[in-house]
Amino acid sequence: MAQGFPKTADVVIIGGGVMGTSTAYHLARKGAQKVVLIEREPFFGVMSTGQCAGGIRHQFSSEINIRLSIESIRMLEAFPEEMGQDIDLRFIGYLFLLTDEEDVAAFRANVALQHSLGVKTQWLDPSQIARRVPLLNLEAVRAGTFYQREGLCDPASLVQGYVTNARKLGARLFTNTEAVGIRSSGGHISAVETNQGLIQTPVVVNACGAWAPQIGRMVGVDIPIEPIRRQIVVTTPIPEVPPDFPFVIFFRESLYFHPEGEGILTGKSNPDETSGYKLSVDPDWEMVHMDEAMVRMPILQKAGLLSHWAGLYEVTPDAHPILGRIPTLEGFYLMAGFSGHGLMHGPMVGRLMAEEILDGRTHTLNIDPFRYDRFLAGELHPEYNVV
Ligand SMILES: Cc1cc2nc3c(=O)[nH]c(=O)nc-3n(C[C@H](O)[C@H](O)[C@H](O)COP(=O)(O)OP(=O)(O)OC[C@H]3O[C@@H](n4cnc5c(N)ncnc54)[C@H](O)[C@@H]3O)c2cc1C
């Protein structure tokens, strides 16, 4: 066993992305003793969290996702003062562009729901959109939705803020530490086996994102999450991009653009991507993506490739996460399956998980629509605004 490695804990969190680190912080802040987090990579937040596009938005179709965004974005605004860590939060706005009548109808209903919850999304017609984003080819665009209190933040800084502050409050967080087994007896969690030694604990939080099903298999719990590769390209500087260029999504094409440094970050989801732990860039899909990106944003033809990478979405059957206790195994908690929009929800979800563990149930937000039980009951209500 590695020297100084804990032999016991009150809670062991497996996974050091935004979900795990936010939970470690919120548990410690709420007074939990002996909180341990283990991450198998050499750094925290380098898997899906570090590979994401950094977008934060309220524009969802389900009430619970909108409520989560409202709370999380408030927490992100307070983050620099509360945590002493800047997160490069920028409200550049999100602009969804709609080309299909079916999407226009669905977004009208979504915008009505957003308004009822205080999210004042604007409905834009093609001429208003053309004035807002003159660099884009808007062929076939029928309408758009825009909300200014959305945009970007830096995932690495967010995770670093949680790690530093969780440690200040007494939590112990380890890298290079892999969970290799979980022990239970009599329907209760009893210990986590790691490559650094055994930790006796009555509570395990599975915050392993796309790898959450592997942790579930250690205790015989089937977790319906698929790892789906998603790719990103960042260009060299494009001086013509104005400072107020928003996070733009051609919704039907699953194609998005946002300013990144002095260039543009773009992504496009491959609808035929198959499940698997694929972390290298698919060059064929990158060709398809960039061909379409240059049609929609012709100025990209003048730019070069600065960097590109692939990461994993952690996709559930209804694109809603799975959150809370697992009813069949006492002490086993799950927070995963954010289906491509987890970074922005990490702050509030960490707080909710701390409530669920320490108070027995969440109370700042009812997470019933996210519970594992919905799969047992067959009650799925898919999120529509998935990119
Ligand atoms: C290309 C792309 C773009 C995205 N864009 C956005 C966006 O704009 N906005 C947004 O909100 N979300 C976005 N997302 C989604 C977001 O990144 C995820 O939902 C979120 O980061 C999930 O966080 P997590 O902590 O659950 O997972 P992760 O960050 O993957 O963390 C899980 C951790 O568990 C660790 N782990 C796994 N197995 C073990 C083990 N056995 N022992 C110890 N540790 C283990 C992994 O190493 C990993 O660090 C995007 C994702 C991708 C891939």
Image (cartoon, rainbow, N blue to C red):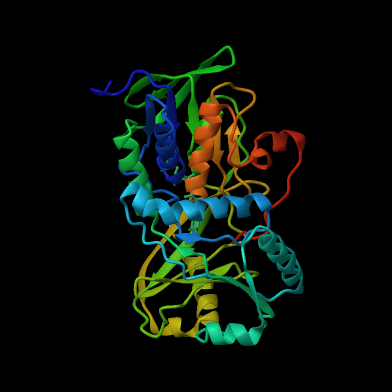
* Residue drawn 52% across the image and 36% down it: 353
6 to 15, vertically: above or below? above
Q: How many numbered discs, if any?
A: 0
Residue 118 visible in the snapshot: yes
Drawn side of residue 133 relative to residue 177, left or right = right
Residue 94 at x, y percent in the picture: 54, 69
Q: Split into 4 quadrants, where in the image is the C terminus?
A: bottom right
* Residue drawn 64% across the image and 41% down it: 370
Residue 238 at x, y percent in the picture: 37, 81
Closest to the observer: 102 or 105?
105
Closest to the observer: 71 or 290?
71
96 to 314, vertically: above or below? below
Q: Split into 4 quadrants, where in the image is the N terminus?
A: top left
* Residue drawn 51% across the image and 27% down it: 358
Q: Quadrant of residue 97?
A: bottom right
Query: Which residue is situated farthest in the left direction here?
Result: 3
171 to 127, vertically: above or below? above
Residue 280 at x, y percent in the picture: 43, 56
Residue 210 visible in the snapshot: no
72 to 90, vertically: above or below? above
Drawn side of residue 265 relative to residue 1, left or right = right
Query: Which residue is situated farthest in the top direction here?
Result: 186
Drawn side of residue 70 relative to residue 200, left or right = right
Residue 381 at x, y percent in the picture: 73, 49
Drawn side of residue 68 relative to residue 199, left or right = right
